[in-house]
Image (tube, rainbow, N blue to C red):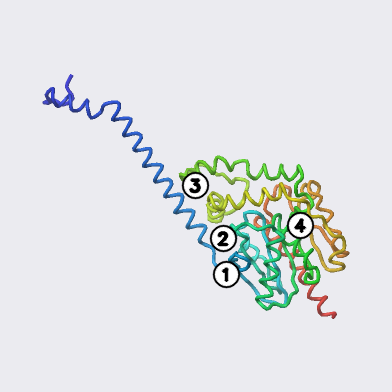
Amino acid sequence: MKFYEDSNSVERYRFRRIFHKKNLVKAILLLLAATLLAGYLYENYEAKQHLDAYTGNTITVNQVTYNYQVVGSGDYTVIVDGAAGESDLSRQKLVEAFDGKARLFFYDRPGYGGTKGDYKTPKEVAEDLHFIFRRFGWKMEFILMGEEYGSLVMQEYLHLYPDEVLGAVFLNPMGEALGSEEMARYEGIHTASFPSKEGLGLFGIPRALQNAGILDFFDHVDLPEEEKNMYANLRLSKDFMAALKTEYQYMTAGEPLPVKSMLLQDKPFALVTTKLSEERYSQDKYLSYSSDASVFYVQDSVRDILLERPKDVAPVLYTVVDKVIRSGYKK
């Protein structure tokens, strides 16, 4: 048998030697190593691009450099604290939907966005926020808005500094359910896919599959393509997942944060949730914060209220701000 028409036995020997089984295995291993290296570099480059995309100002308090933004204008400030894994995307949606007469204060908790520093508990973050506002020289009167994990920070702020709170909007609050079996199930639902994402994510495989449209790891979130791309690429980043996991673990292992009845007296309080979450996490108890409390429901399928239903949240916030303004005029 000849490999080439005019080849001789020496040429045939060299050809067989080049394509010897051991050399073929080496070639495959080298190709695999090169592919994994390329995936690793791709993953780290894309993660950095998305994690460094945050803009804002910074202030250092108690060994944490907080990244923050102030949007809008008005006599009153709304402190906005989002759910675990909150990104600039949900903030943009709130800004677009809300046209009330108040400025919105956004910030990144440690582990997210432009904030640099180690994890802090919700109480510690609330204390840092209080110190930040004093550093700013702001009038210490605020409207609180917190969702899920962010509601823990806002609830701690309310308990620590009740005289500074003029009203509040809590979205899917979790304080009463901390450490419960329901909370453990909640964490399990949200983190079930983390091991595979973290393992394969070292080499950019989930990100590549997501961006190529082969798989959608976040098909439960209904967003336009460009926004979905931003959302997915953030949540597939190792550092972002680590911060997300830490906050879920705190909610599972933390001590319950019970409501202090009538702490807001007659100041406006609004609860925005689903009927399913209200029952599972004892959220009806939050209505006892004030004699002027109300509840608003969104569909049970909604997991991130501020991100998915900003047009439902904005009118609720507007109503609370309007009540605060009218109450101020009475004084």
Horizontally, is 264 left or right of 308 in the view?
right
Q: Which residue is mark 3?
A: 207
Residues under numbered marks 3 and 2 in contact, where contact means CB atoms less than 8 Å apart: no
User: Circle 1 — which element?
Assistant: strand
Q: Which residue is mark 4?
A: 272
Q: Residue furthest top?
A: 1
Q: Earlier in the sequence, mark 3 or mark 1?
A: 1
Q: Which residue is mark 1?
A: 58
> What amino acid type should be assigned to the residue bearing mark 2?
Gly
**Residue occupying the point 47% across, 46% down:** 204
Horizontally, is 261 left or right of 168 in the view?
right
Local packing at callout 3 (Cα closer than 10 Å; few below 14, some 14-19, many 20+) is: many
CA distance for labels 1 and 4: 30 Å
> What amino acid type should be assigned to the residue bearing mark 4?
Val
Q: Earlier in the sequence, mark 1 or mark 4?
A: 1
Of 111 and 74, the residue lying toward us: 111
Residue 16 image position (x, y, % from top left): 22, 25
